[in-house]
Image: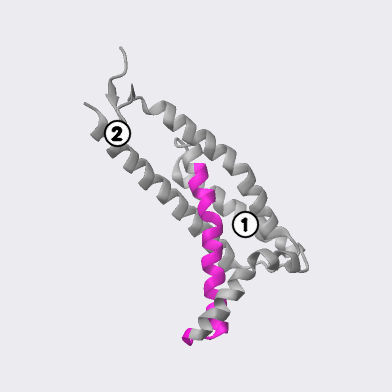
Amino acid sequence: MTQPRTADRNGRTGSLSPSRGLRNLQLWSRILLAPYLVALLLVTLLPGAEAARVTGIVATVATWLGVFGVPYDIAYPIMEFLANIALFVPFGLLIAVAWPTVPRGRIVAAGFATSGAIELVQLMLPTRFSTLSDLIANTLGTVIGCAVAVLFAGYLRRRRRTLEP
Protein backbone atom coordinates (compact mmCIF):
# COMPACT_ATOMS: atom_id res chain seq x y z
CA MET A 1 0.00 0.00 0.00
CA THR A 2 1.39 3.39 -0.93
CA GLN A 3 1.40 6.43 1.29
CA PRO A 4 -1.28 9.04 0.53
CA ARG A 5 0.03 12.04 -1.34
CA THR A 6 -0.91 15.63 -0.71
CA ALA A 7 0.24 19.09 -1.74
CA ASP A 8 1.98 21.40 0.68
CA ARG A 9 1.35 25.15 0.75
CA ASN A 10 3.77 25.60 -2.17
CA GLY A 11 1.93 23.07 -4.31
CA ARG A 12 4.60 20.37 -4.02
CA THR A 13 3.33 16.84 -3.54
CA GLY A 14 4.90 14.24 -1.31
CA SER A 15 4.28 11.38 1.04
CA LEU A 16 2.55 12.02 4.34
CA SER A 17 4.83 9.49 6.01
CA PRO A 18 6.01 11.10 9.24
CA SER A 19 8.91 8.71 9.49
CA ARG A 20 11.30 10.68 7.28
CA GLY A 21 10.79 13.99 9.07
CA LEU A 22 10.81 12.28 12.45
CA ARG A 23 14.00 10.41 11.62
CA ASN A 24 15.66 13.69 10.61
CA LEU A 25 14.55 15.33 13.85
CA GLN A 26 15.81 12.37 15.87
CA LEU A 27 19.12 12.42 14.02
CA TRP A 28 19.64 16.16 14.57
CA SER A 29 18.74 15.79 18.23
CA ARG A 30 21.36 13.06 18.60
CA ILE A 31 23.95 15.15 16.78
CA LEU A 32 23.22 18.25 18.90
CA LEU A 33 23.35 16.21 22.10
CA ALA A 34 27.13 15.70 21.80
CA PRO A 35 28.16 19.40 21.70
CA TYR A 36 25.52 20.20 24.31
CA LEU A 37 27.01 17.64 26.72
CA VAL A 38 30.52 19.00 26.10
CA ALA A 39 29.31 22.54 26.82
CA LEU A 40 27.44 21.30 29.92
CA LEU A 41 30.58 19.70 31.30
CA LEU A 42 32.68 22.77 30.55
CA VAL A 43 30.22 25.13 32.24
CA THR A 44 29.82 22.92 35.30
CA LEU A 45 33.34 21.60 35.78
CA LEU A 46 35.67 24.41 34.75
CA PRO A 47 37.47 26.13 37.63
CA GLY A 48 35.31 28.83 39.22
CA ALA A 49 37.16 31.79 37.68
CA GLU A 50 36.97 30.28 34.18
CA ALA A 51 33.31 29.35 34.56
CA ALA A 52 32.51 32.89 35.72
CA ARG A 53 33.38 34.10 32.23
CA VAL A 54 30.54 31.96 30.88
CA THR A 55 28.10 32.22 33.78
CA GLY A 56 28.79 35.87 34.61
CA ILE A 57 25.42 36.77 33.15
CA VAL A 58 23.77 35.56 36.37
CA ALA A 59 25.64 38.18 38.40
CA THR A 60 25.00 40.82 35.74
CA VAL A 61 21.24 40.20 35.77
CA ALA A 62 21.19 40.09 39.58
CA THR A 63 22.98 43.45 39.69
CA TRP A 64 20.62 44.87 37.06
CA LEU A 65 17.61 43.79 39.12
CA GLY A 66 18.93 46.09 41.84
CA VAL A 67 17.71 48.97 39.66
CA PHE A 68 14.21 47.68 40.35
CA GLY A 69 14.81 47.45 44.08
CA VAL A 70 15.60 43.73 44.24
CA PRO A 71 18.58 43.24 46.57
CA TYR A 72 21.52 41.40 45.04
CA ASP A 73 21.52 38.85 47.88
CA ILE A 74 17.98 37.85 46.90
CA ALA A 75 18.29 38.20 43.11
CA TYR A 76 21.50 36.20 42.69
CA PRO A 77 20.31 32.87 44.16
CA ILE A 78 17.03 33.14 42.25
CA MET A 79 18.81 33.87 38.97
CA GLU A 80 21.30 31.07 39.61
CA PHE A 81 18.43 28.63 40.25
CA LEU A 82 16.70 29.71 37.03
CA ALA A 83 19.99 29.44 35.11
CA ASN A 84 20.45 25.88 36.38
CA ILE A 85 16.94 25.03 35.19
CA ALA A 86 17.69 26.51 31.77
CA LEU A 87 21.00 24.63 31.63
CA PHE A 88 19.24 21.24 31.75
CA VAL A 89 16.17 21.95 29.58
CA PRO A 90 18.12 20.88 26.46
CA PHE A 91 19.12 17.67 28.23
CA GLY A 92 15.50 16.54 28.60
CA LEU A 93 14.41 17.93 25.25
CA LEU A 94 17.20 16.47 23.14
CA ILE A 95 17.05 13.02 24.71
CA ALA A 96 13.24 12.88 24.52
CA VAL A 97 13.29 13.84 20.84
CA ALA A 98 16.30 11.69 19.94
CA TRP A 99 14.84 8.56 21.58
CA PRO A 100 11.05 9.02 21.72
CA THR A 101 10.38 5.48 22.96
CA VAL A 102 12.44 5.94 26.14
CA PRO A 103 10.05 6.47 29.06
CA ARG A 104 10.09 10.06 30.31
CA GLY A 105 10.76 8.86 33.85
CA ARG A 106 14.03 7.32 32.69
CA ILE A 107 15.03 10.55 30.99
CA VAL A 108 14.32 12.48 34.19
CA ALA A 109 16.29 9.87 36.15
CA ALA A 110 19.19 10.32 33.71
CA GLY A 111 19.04 14.09 34.24
CA PHE A 112 19.03 13.57 38.00
CA ALA A 113 21.96 11.13 37.76
CA THR A 114 23.94 13.41 35.46
CA SER A 115 23.37 16.36 37.76
CA GLY A 116 24.26 14.23 40.77
CA ALA A 117 27.50 13.13 39.12
CA ILE A 118 28.37 16.75 38.32
CA GLU A 119 27.65 17.79 41.92
CA LEU A 120 29.81 14.93 43.27
CA VAL A 121 32.72 15.95 41.05
CA GLN A 122 32.26 19.58 42.13
CA LEU A 123 32.66 18.46 45.75
CA MET A 124 36.26 17.54 44.87
CA LEU A 125 37.02 20.77 43.01
CA PRO A 126 38.32 23.51 45.31
CA THR A 127 36.89 26.37 43.23
CA ARG A 128 33.40 24.90 42.71
CA PHE A 129 30.41 24.58 45.03
CA SER A 130 28.08 21.61 45.12
CA THR A 131 24.53 22.34 46.27
CA LEU A 132 21.26 20.48 46.62
CA SER A 133 19.46 23.39 44.95
CA ASP A 134 21.55 22.80 41.80
CA LEU A 135 20.50 19.15 41.76
CA ILE A 136 16.84 20.14 42.14
CA ALA A 137 17.03 22.88 39.50
CA ASN A 138 18.85 20.67 37.01
CA THR A 139 16.32 17.88 37.45
CA LEU A 140 13.48 20.37 37.04
CA GLY A 141 15.13 21.57 33.82
CA THR A 142 15.16 17.99 32.55
CA VAL A 143 11.44 17.66 33.38
CA ILE A 144 10.67 20.89 31.51
CA GLY A 145 12.70 19.71 28.51
CA CYS A 146 10.73 16.43 28.42
CA ALA A 147 7.46 18.36 28.72
CA VAL A 148 8.40 20.58 25.77
CA ALA A 149 9.17 17.46 23.72
CA VAL A 150 5.81 15.92 24.64
CA LEU A 151 3.95 19.13 23.77
CA PHE A 152 5.84 19.43 20.48
CA ALA A 153 5.08 15.79 19.58
CA GLY A 154 1.39 16.41 20.30
CA TYR A 155 1.46 19.48 18.08
CA LEU A 156 3.05 17.47 15.25
CA ARG A 157 0.44 14.70 15.61
CA ARG A 158 -2.41 17.21 15.42
CA ARG A 159 -0.80 18.92 12.44
CA ARG A 160 -0.31 15.60 10.66
CA ARG A 161 -3.98 14.70 11.21
CA THR A 162 -5.08 17.97 9.59
CA LEU A 163 -2.90 17.19 6.52
CA GLU A 164 -4.27 13.67 6.07
CA PRO A 165 -7.10 13.32 3.55
Left or right: 67 in relation to 152: right
Q: What residue type is labelled 1?
A: Gly
Q: In the depicted view, which residue is nearer to us: 106 or 74?
A: 74
Quarter of the figure that contains the C terminus: top left
Relative depth, front residue between 104 and 90: 90
Asked if residue 137 is among those painted magenta in the image, a careful observer would answer: no
Q: Position of residue 111 (x, y in %)?
A: 55, 51
Residue 16: give x, y in percent of width and height: 32, 25
Residue 116 — which label?
A: 1
Report the residue at 61% width, 52% height from top: 114
SS label for mark 2:
loop
Viewer-side label of 1, 2: 2
Residue at x-position 75% and y-position 69%? 49
Quadrant of the rendering where the N terminus is positioned: top left
Give the residue displayed 24% in from the left and 35% down from the top.
Answer: 162
Which residue is the site of mark 2? 9
Name the residue nearer the viewer: 160 or 78: 160
Residue positioned 43% across, 32% down in the render: 22
Check disc 2: other Cα within 10 Å, few if <14, some if 14-19, many if 20+: few
Q: Which mark is residue 106?
A: none
In the rendered structure, which disc, 1 or 2, sits on the residue that comes first in sequence? 2
Magenta stretch: dominant secondary structure: helix
Q: What stretch is highlighted in magenta?
A: 68-95
**Residue 94 sits inside the magenta stretch:** yes
